Amino acid sequence: MLSFIRPGSPQDISELDLPSTVRLAFPQGTDHLSHFEVSLTPDEGCYAGGTFLFDFRVPESYPSDPPKVRALTQVFHPAIDTEGHVDMSLLGADWRPDMGIKTVIYGLHRLFLLPDTDDALNRDAGSLLHSDRPGFERAVSASVHEGATIEGKFYPAATGERNVPSRNED
């Protein structure tokens, strides 16, 4: 059994029951379950048709502490900055040990369906969403499908590529 938690835990990969818009990959092989990637392809909303790659690192203290999640695909989104940091309350103060990886993945999916401006990490995206939702949606669509320069920053088409500057992590 491939377990995300600790030996003896009933939660395994086959029990995640993820939607068809989500794919998991294990870049270091399935012997290293504490590090994996999630590819998310929203099928609704202004991010529909784009593919976004996220890096998940599950700490030794999981499930007491949430996984570390970072976007690997650049995206013009209020909750994701240009370095790939993701602002999602359940990755911080709202995390509870009874939550799991599936909760985080569905939370990411929700970010793309319902972007909001609360505590925007990407201030340009948050400001545009707040002041001009139709303009925000046009900018997102252009960046997702063709790539676009928004507020002086180029966002390549969202094809699931790793294009966020890397950082050194094990």
Image: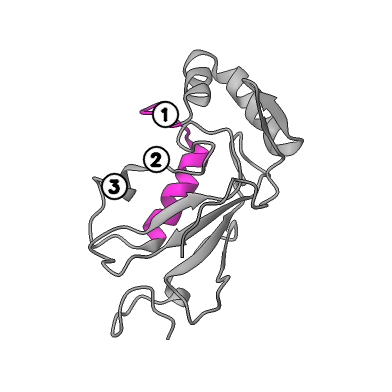
Q: Position of residue 161 (x, y in %)?
A: 68, 52
Residue at screen point 37% across, 56% down: 103
Please tell me the numbered disc located at residue 87. Answer: 2
Please tell me the numbered disc located at residue 62. Answer: none
Give the residue number, with chain letter if any, for mark 1: 120
Say above or below: 156 vs 27.
above
Please tell me the numbered disc located at residue 92. Answer: 3
Determine the secondary structure under disc 1: loop
Say above or below: 65 vs 120.
below
Location of residue 158 (image quadrant): top right
Disc 3 crowd rating (10 Å Cα; few below 14, some 14-19, many 20+) is few
Is there a contact, CB below 8 Å, between mark 3 and mark 2? Answer: no
Residue at screen point 43% across, 53% down: 69
* Mark earlier in primary sequence (3, 2): 2
Say above or below: 79 vs 159.
above
What residue range appears in magenta?
102-121
* Mark earlier in primary sequence (1, 3): 3
* Residue 25 relative to residue 108: left or right: right
Determine the secondary structure under disc 2: loop
Is there a contact, CB below 8 Å, between mark 1 and mark 2? Answer: yes
Give amino acid for label 1: Ala
